[in-house]
Amino acid sequence: MLKNGQIKLIEKTNDQTDTLFASDKNGNVDKSKSVTVEKGIVGQLQYLRDGNTSDGYGSYHQAIKESTESTQNDMTNLFNFSANNTKVEFS
């Protein structure tokens, strides 16, 4: 995860989890700082709902498709990791 919040794929695996690593100010991977979450959660965050005029809502990132205690814990850990290792505001 870059300091601007962008996530770049380092290596594609068949693991049951995804691990995100922090980066330094130059964009180099810092493997001493990481978070591991259930595979697929990070990918679900990339989908942006463009909004429409019928409901009056603007664009926003859609929610996680299945919410379980495990995914809720993963999302909390991912949020905290992002907040502590980037220079952007997450809400």
Image (cartoon, helix red, strand yellow):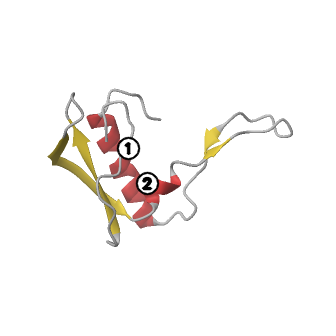
Residue 32 place in picture, x, y as percent: 13, 47
Q: Is residue 65 left or right of residue 91?
A: right
**Where residue 21 is drawn, which disc sits there?**
none
Q: Do the residues labelled 2 and 1 touch (CB within 8 Å)?
A: yes
Q: In this view, does 56 lie above or below 29?
A: above
Mark 1 is surrounded, within 10 Å at the Cα level, by few (under 14), some (14 to 19) or many (20 or more) other residues, namely some
User: Residue 25: percent from the left, percent from the top?
Assistant: 21, 28
Kind of element beneath mark 1: loop
On screen, residue 9 versus residue 24, left or right, reads right
12 left or right of 32?
Answer: right
Q: Relative to 45, is 73 above or below? A: below
Q: Distance between the residues labelled 2 and 1?
A: 9 Å
Residue 7's disc number: 1
Say which quadrant the N terminus sits in.
top left
Quadrant of residue 60 in the image?
top right
Q: Residue at x 33, y 51 (%)?
A: 77
Q: Residue furthest toward the left?
A: 32
* Dot 2 alpha-carbon crowd within 10 angstroms: few under 14, some 14 to 19, many 20 or more: some
Q: Disc 2 marks which amino acid?
A: Val
The x, y position of residue 10, in whole percent, is 29, 52
Which mark is on residue 42? 2
In the image shown, does 83 or 39 lie closer to the viewer? 39
Callout 2: SS: helix
Q: Which residue is drawn at 52% across and 55% down?
A: 44
In this rendered view, identify the residue nearer to me: 49 or 67: 49
Residue at image coords 70%, 40%: 50
Task: Single out the mark in the foreground, 2 or 1.
Answer: 1
Q: What residue type is labelled 1?
A: Ile
Q: In which quarter of the image is residue 83?
A: top left
What residue lies at 38% left-to-right and 35% top-to-bottom?
5
Q: Which of marks 2 and 1 is nearer the N terminus?
A: 1
